[in-house]
C-alpha cells in the first residue's frame, strides 16, 4: 500500500492566473445603465428565460411523467450547484457542463426526447437552475479526474488560433479593460452565463459565446458539447474562483 501511494502522481496546488484581489466580474466592464439593467430582476431581459424555466421545473416529461421536481423537489435544492460546474460525473468519469448534466438527466432519468444545445428549453432550465446560485461564489473542483481537463483548458486558453493567430489570453489577460470599438474587454470570466447579449437580442450559453470569440478571430469553432468546450469552461470557471454568479447576466 505504501509503495502504491508513493507511485501515485501528486497534484500540487496551482497558481491562480489572476490574484484574487484583482479579479473583476464581467459586470465591472458594463456601463452604469447596463449594470443597472442586469441587477434589476424586473427589467433584466434574461429573467424571461428564468421565468420560463420556473414553469418548466414541474412539467412532466417522458413515459414515466417525471419532472425535475420529481427528483429534486423545490428548485432551492439547486442552490450552489451551478457554481460547481463543469464537474466530473462519478458514474461515467466524464467532465460535464451544467447543460450536459441537464441533458443527461432528461435522457437517462426522464427518458424524454433530448433538447438541442441553445434550444429555448435547455437555455430556460439552465438559466433557472443557475439563477438559484446568483450571488454565490464560483467553486469548481479541479482535483483528481478533473485535473487533466483543467490542464487541457489552460492549454486551449493560451493557444494561438485562427487566421488572426490570437489566443484567449491576448485579450482577457493582456488587454483587459481596454476597448474594442464601444465595448470594454473583460477578464473573460463566465459568471454571467447563460447571459442576455444585446448583439444577440437573446439569451445564450457560454458555449455560444466561446464560438463567437473563435469566429471573431476567424478560427475553427468547437462543436457544441465537445471536450474542448468542457475543458475550456472548467479552466475559465477556475480562473473566476471566488467571483459571484451573476446569472442571468446582461452583456453587450
Image: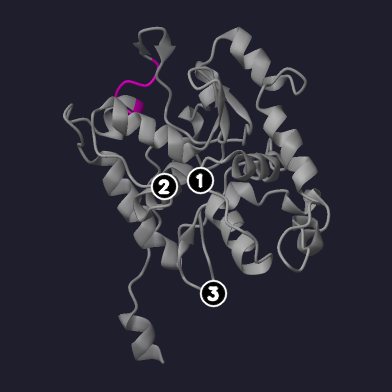
Q: Residue at x 71, y 35 (%)?
A: 50
Residue 131: in magenta span: no
Category of crowding for the residue at label 2, using alpha-carbon neighbours closer than 10 angstroms: few (below 14), some (14–19), many (at least 20): some
The label nearer to you, 2 versus 3, is: 2
> Callout 3: helix, strand or loop?
loop
Which tag, 1 or 2, sits closer to the chain's start? 1
Q: Residue at x 36, y 47 (%)?
A: 223
Instruction: Give the labeled residue for mark 2.
Output: 224
Q: Are marks 1 and 2 in contact (CB under 8 Å)?
A: yes
* Residue 74 drawn at (x, y percent): 83, 52
For the residues labelled 3 and 1, the Cα–Cα distance comes to 23 Å
Quarter location, residue 111: bottom right
Instruction: Between residue 106 and residue 21, name the one nearer to us.
Output: 106
Above or below for 164 versus 220? above
Instruction: Give the labeled residue for mark 1.
Output: 117
Q: Residue at x 67, y 14 (%)?
A: 36
Instruction: Mark yes or no: residue 148 visible.
Output: yes
For the residues labelled 1 and 2, the Cα–Cα distance comes to 7 Å
Which tag, 3 or 1, sits closer to the chain's start? 3
* Segment tinted magenta in the rendering: 172-177
Above or below for 184 versus 209? above
Instruction: Give the labeled residue for mark 3.
Output: 91
Q: Are marks 2 and 3 in contact (CB under 8 Å)?
A: no
The label nearer to you, 3 versus 1, is: 1
* Residue 115 drawn at (x, y percent): 57, 51
> Callout 1: helix, strand or loop?
loop
Amino acid at each position: 500500500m505504501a509503495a502504491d501511494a508513493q507511485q501515485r502522481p501528486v497534484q500540487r496546488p496551482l497558481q491562480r492566473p489572476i490574484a484574487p484581489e484583482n479579479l473583476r466580474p464581467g459586470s465591472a466592464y458594463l456601463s452604469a445603465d447596463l449594470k443597472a439593467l442586469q441587477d434589476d430582476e424586473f427589467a433584466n431581459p434574461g429573467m424571461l428565460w428564468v421565468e420560463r424555466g420556473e414553469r418548466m421545473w414541474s412539467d412532466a416529461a417522458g413515459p414515466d411523467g417525471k419532472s425535475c421536481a420529481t427528483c429534486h423537489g423545490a428548485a432551492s435544492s439547486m442552490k450552489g450547484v451551478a457554481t460547481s460546474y463543469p464537474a466530473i460525473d462519478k458514474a461515467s468519469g466524464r467532465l460535464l457542463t451544467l447543460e450536459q448534466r441537464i441533458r443527461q438527466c432528461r435522457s437517462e432519468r426522464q427518458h424524454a426526447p433530448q433538447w438541442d444545445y441553445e434550444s429555448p428549453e435547455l437555455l430556460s432550465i439552465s438559466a433557472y437552475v443557475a439563477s438559484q446560485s446568483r450571488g454565490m461564489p464560483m467553486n469548481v473542483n479541479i482535483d483528481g479526474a478533473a485535473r487533466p481537463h483543467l490542464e487541457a483548458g489552460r492549454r486551449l486558453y493560451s493557444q494561438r488560433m485562427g487566421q488572426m493567430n490570437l489566443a484567449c489570453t491576448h485579450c482577457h489577460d493582456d488587454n483587459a479593460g481596454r476597448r474594442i470599438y464601444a465595448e470594454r474587454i473583460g477578464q473573460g470570466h463566465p459568471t454571467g452565463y447563460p447571459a442576455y447579449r444585446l448583439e444577440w437580442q437573446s439569451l445564450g450559453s457560454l458555449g455560444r459565446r466561446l464560438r463567437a470569440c473563435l469566429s471573431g478571430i476567424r478560427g475553427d469553432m468547437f462543436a457544441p458539447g465537445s471536450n474542448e468546450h468542457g475543458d475550456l469552461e472548467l479552466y475559465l470557471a477556475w480562473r473566476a474562483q471566488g467571483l459571484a454568479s451573476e446569472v442571468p447576466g446582461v452583456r453587450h
